[in-house]
Image (cartoon, rainbow, N blue to C red):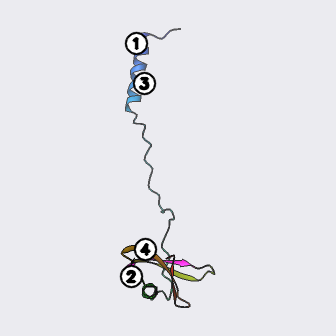
Amino acid sequence: MSISRFCRAACLIAFATALGACTLNTMPRAMPIIPAPGDTDPAPAEGMAGAEAACTQAGRERGLDVLGVVSTRDVTGADGSPERDVMLQVARSDTRLEVRCNYQPETGVARIMLI
């Protein structure tokens, strides 16, 4: 049984039209109702107000020319206590670099790391 030329041509044109209309893009998805959980900044811990000043002073005691505070972030110490890491921009011997300072609010100790 053979298909007539007219039917074959009509099917071919319909197939080509359908394929030409297809953009092969993924279908758009609706936005989620509830946003997915992501990284959020922790709430500031109590007693961290003096972290920047203590770290600046610790840098000066080590002979560094402290140019300013680059960033701060709350961290958890090895024993689970809240601490704050302060990144300082310092100059030493005509070289500018960033150093990390760890501030422990329970003891008020600021330590310059990796010089």
Measure the alpha-carbon separation of dots 1 and 4: 78 Å
Residue 85: mark in rendering: none
The front one of 87 and 39 is 87
Residue carrying label 4: 98
At 46% from the left and 76% from the top, the residue drawn is 99
Residue carrying label 3: 15
Q: Residues within 10 Å of mark 3 (few under 14, many from 20)?
A: few
**Quick one: label 2 or label 4, which is nearer the N terminus?**
2
At 48% from the left and 70% from the top, the residue drawn is 40
* Residue type for callout 4: Glu
Are discs 3 and 1 less than 8 Å apart at CB?
no
Callout 2: helix, strand or loop? Answer: strand
**Quick one: label 3 or label 1, which is nearer the N terminus?**
1
**Quick one: label 3 or label 2, which is nearer the N terminus?**
3
**Quick one: label 4 or label 3, which is nearer the N terminus?**
3
Q: Which residues are magenta?
A: 68-76
Whether residue 14 sits left or right of residue 113 in the image: it is left
Q: Residues within 10 Å of mark 4 (few under 14, many from 20)?
A: some
* Residue type for callout 2: Val
Q: Residues within 10 Å of mark 1 (few under 14, many from 20)?
A: few
Residue carrying label 1: 6
